[in-house]
Image (cartoon, rainbow, N blue to C red):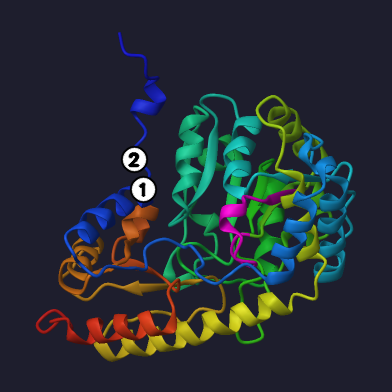
């Protein structure tokens, strides 16, 4: 008798865990591996956030359980952030819930919303956790097509009438992982209209909302009139404040859905460590100058790598947000084949586009997650690659 459930046995290993395993093996052999595969910021958490954590961690009153929905201080900070940054009013008591990172929140939201056999519209290409979370909830992922010719906005007219009718939930993500695509508010206006017309809940993953360049400001789906009737939005401090390991995020929006997730989570966890929530509140209430400084660093890295790829004949759209470049593989290669060439011949880990769905074929995702010095080494290695005969 197997003691492992079928849904876990049928679940493929998490792609990035597999990359880390291969990286460890190569490092053990003495290979100087540069990892541009995982979207993990290398920049430090702002000093004032760390100082707040240290102060609060010394207070024994903060060593107790957090309220299940998160500390009032953190939820009020999220509400203040939305009002200041987006002009959106949120009720901290009913429309905001603290999460142990948005990844956890997305997986649990799907559990809270769908029943076995129900359909979820999942962006293709898109963050792999969307599909695996639907699988674990017993649902069915229905491909929501995105393509480079249309700027990776949702192609609702490519969905069949049957898929529109049976879908219960739709996931979107801008600035996008993996494509780095950015949008304007009109895309959210169209998405909310689609939700209303087809009775579909919209969940927007805004993990990269503050990581933007060149004067671009990412919109919130909550800025759409009456969006709360049809939508929720996830936020995270992981990328914007370099707090990946802190595991702190939030969901806002539709009260019924937020409270359904709160009910589920109260039976599974007791929220995040209070000092982390209070430090995160301090981050959200800041003037965001630390975020702007980080963004400038990412933009400089992006420009350097973009120029090197272009020189090598590898085309990428110059992004306005996220910490990624989404690049076409050279002619004659598959996504996996070129990723393997980069690792085997250049010692550089990139992620094949097929990790993010069928529409990712022909692309690689490159994270801007190493220092300028290491990035200069990446550039040298790309320049040394033999791509003759494969680039037209």
Badge 2 crowding class, 10 Å Cα cut-off, few under 14, some 14 to 19, many 20 or more, is: few
Quarter of the view holding residue 263: top right
Q: From the image, which quarter does the C terminus lie in?
A: bottom left
Q: Position of residue 105 (x, y in %)?
A: 63, 42
1 and 2 marks in contact (CB < 8 Å): yes
Q: Residue at x 29, y 91 (%)?
A: 311
The N terminus: image quadrant: top left
Seen in the image, is 181 located left or right of residue 10? right
Magenta stretch: give its range.
238-251
Q: Is residue 245 magenta?
A: yes
Residue closest to the far left: 389
Residue 235 in the figure: left or right of residue 85: left
> What number of labels is visible?
2
Q: Position of residue 110 (x, y in %)?
A: 60, 36
Q: Residue 226 appears in which quarter of the rendering?
A: bottom right
Q: Secondary structure at mark 1?
A: helix
Tell me where residue 212 appears, x and y as whole percent: 61, 76
Work out how far the residue at label 1 is from the one at label 2, CA to CA, in angstroms. 7 Å
Q: Residues within 10 Å of mark 1 (few under 14, many from 20)?
A: few
Q: Nearer the viewer, mark 1 or mark 2?
A: 1
Residue under label 2, please give it: 13
């Amino acid at each position: 008798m197997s003691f492992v459930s079928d849904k876990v046995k049928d679940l493929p290993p998490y792609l990035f865990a597999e990359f880390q395993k291969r990286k460890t093996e190569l490092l053990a052999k003495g290979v100087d591996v540069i990892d541009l595969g995982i979207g993990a910021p290398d920049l430090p958490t702002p000093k004032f956030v760390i100082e707040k954590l240290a102060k609060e961690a010394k207070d024994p009153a903060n060593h107790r359980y957090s309220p299940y929905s998160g500390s009032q201080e953190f939820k009020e900070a999220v509400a203040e952030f939305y009002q200041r940054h987006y002009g959106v009013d949120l009720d901290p008591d009913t429309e905001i819930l603290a999460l142990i990172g948005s990844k956890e929140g997305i997986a649990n939201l799907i559990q809270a919303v769908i029943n076995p056999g129900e359909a979820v519209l999942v962006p293709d290409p898109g963050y792999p956790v969307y599909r695996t979370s639907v699988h674990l909830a017993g649902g069915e992922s229905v491909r929501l097509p995105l393509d480079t010719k249309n700027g990776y906005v949702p192609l609702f007219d490519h969905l069949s009438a049957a898929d529109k009718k049976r879908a219960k939930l739709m996931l979107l993500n801008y600035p996008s992982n993996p494509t780095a695509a950015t949008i304007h508010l009109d895309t959210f206006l169209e998405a909310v209209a689609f939700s209303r017309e087809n009775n579909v809940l919209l969940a927007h993953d805004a993990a990269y909302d503050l990581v933007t360049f060149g004067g671009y400001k990412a919109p919130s789906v909550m800025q759409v009139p009456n969006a709360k009737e049809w939508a929720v939005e996830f936020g995270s401090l992981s990328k914007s404040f370099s707090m990946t390991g802190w595991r702190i995020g939030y969901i806002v929006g539709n009260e019924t859905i937020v409270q359904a997730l709160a009910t589920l989570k109260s039976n599974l966890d007791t929220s995040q460590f209070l000092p982390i929530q209070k430090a995160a509140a301090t981050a959200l209430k800041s003037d965001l100058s630390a975020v702007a400084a980080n963004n400038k660093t990412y933009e400089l890295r992006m420009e350097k790598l973009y120029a090197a790829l272009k020189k090598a004949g590898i085309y990428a759209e110059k992004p306005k947000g996220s910490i990624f470049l989404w690049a076409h593989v050279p002619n004659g290669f598959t996504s996996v084949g070129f990723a393997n060439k980069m690792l085997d011949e250049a010692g550089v880990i990139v992620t094949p586009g097929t990790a993010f769905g069928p529409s990712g074929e022909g692309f690689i995702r490159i994270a801007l997650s190493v220092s300028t010095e290491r990035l200069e080494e990446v550039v040298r290695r790309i320049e040394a690659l033999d791509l003759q005969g494969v680039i037209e």
